[in-house]
Amino acid sequence: MGQGFYGIRAEAVASCVVLSHPGCADGGVHKPVGITGDHKPVANGGDLGESGAPMNPDFVREALRQVRYPGFSRDIVSFGLVKNITCEPGLTVVQIEVQTADPAVPERIFQDCHAVLDPLPDIGHARVEIEVKGAPAAAGGQVRATIPGVKRIIAVASGKGGVGKSTVAANLAVALAASGAKVGLCDCDLYGPSVAQMFGTVERPLANEQDEIIPIEAHGVKLMSMGFLLDGSSPVIVRGPMATRYTQQFLRQVAWGELDYLILDLPPGTGDIQLTIVQTVAVDGAVIVTTPQEVALIDARKAVSMFGKVNVPILGLIENMSWFECDAGKRYHLFGNGGGAREAELLGVPLFGQIPIDVPTREGGDAGKPVALLSAEANKVAAAFHRTAAAVRSKTGV
Ligand code: ADP
């Protein structure tokens, strides 16, 4: 019985990322920024001991990695829910802490833990104790860390990649700044950071005495991106819990100063990293970027559902690539017409803006000069971003 659990080991992360700043301009207060990876410990999973001997807590913990948080691919161990494991002869006690308003969540975790633990040899009696804490506070609440000095944290998410999420995040940040707000933009995409490129900066950030990273400033926006910490050629090879840890470290250690808005450009998708981000900082609300096309809307719905699970309100939708207007002024709805408006109505949230496909927008992104730097009169997409920024401001009240 339970032989299948022999040899379960944490998947050793064979590689780490070591990033460092090449030098400090003033040689004084500021220190180079670096993120150093380490190796995930290998649990003692191969030695169960003689029958009748107590279980090894490490082994139990590794076995519990098979239990997923309901509705997500992430397991309860890497999620940090398993608070304590004690093993005595004949009795194994697992203490779990979960924060949810949904009674089905602890129930499911309880059953799944027993399904994993009960068949283990030498487990004796497995007791799973789950402490259920109240739901995470609504946006702006006390559970997730607020960032001192930052009035509103807004996540820009898409579910699907390639719909222009980063382009929208960058231009929204620039347009908000142009409207007089103090704005920061944090590119949270560990695997494909693009903000550095979109703002045309190759500067590397420095750290202050508190070991916080000082954001780079470009086009009136404070910027932080994994792209600033990585060499252009550095492959990012962290994954799983390591990636989650980097992202948390990255989010917590930036000296943003006073901001009206911090825009978080989330990585595409609705997986563990996105979940970690919205649970690490007190996100006030999410803006979902989609194209009018059904395939994009399907993934946008997944993003909406993910935010719903962690009680982050959807502030509104931005439809990108809504149409292409030729020189003669005729509009071509390349990805369909009206998808964003229909979805917004379905969700009961505002459609903040419709952004057309536009060559200067793409060129501006590639050249490090977001199109929203232009005036509304000079470019129609810039105008759309300025209107969108005004809509976001009136909805969020800053
Ligand atoms: P995502 O962040 O969703 O992966 P990006 O913002 O990186 O998408 O955009 C993907 C590509 O589409 C980029 O080359 C970008 O310049 C281009 N793009 C995005 N929105 C527009 C737009 N409205 N008009 C023209 N090109 C756009």
Image: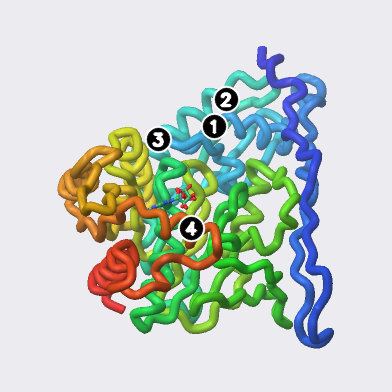
Q: Circle 1 is placed at which residue position? A: 67
Q: CA distance from mark 3 to mark 4?
A: 52 Å
Picture coordinates of residue 24, whole percent (x, y):
80, 78
Q: Residues within 10 Å of mark 4 (few under 14, many from 20)?
A: some
Element type at marker 1?
A: loop
Tell which residue pokes out farthest to the top in this image.
Answer: 1
Q: For residue 257, which quarter of the picture?
A: bottom right
Of badges 1 and 3, the one in the foreground is 1
Q: CA distance from mark 2 to mark 4?
A: 54 Å
Do we see residue 352 in this rendering? yes
Instruction: Give the mark nearest the N terminus, 2 or 4.
Output: 2
On screen, residue 49 versus residue 103, left or right, reads: right
Q: CA distance from mark 4 to mark 1?
A: 46 Å
On screen, residue 317 versus residue 34, left or right, reads: left
Residue type at the position of mark 3 = Glu
Q: Residue at x 61, y 33 (%)?
A: 64
Q: Circle 4 is placed at which residue position? A: 363
On screen, residue 14 versus residue 320, left or right, reads: right
Picture coordinates of residue 40, whole percent (x, y):
76, 44
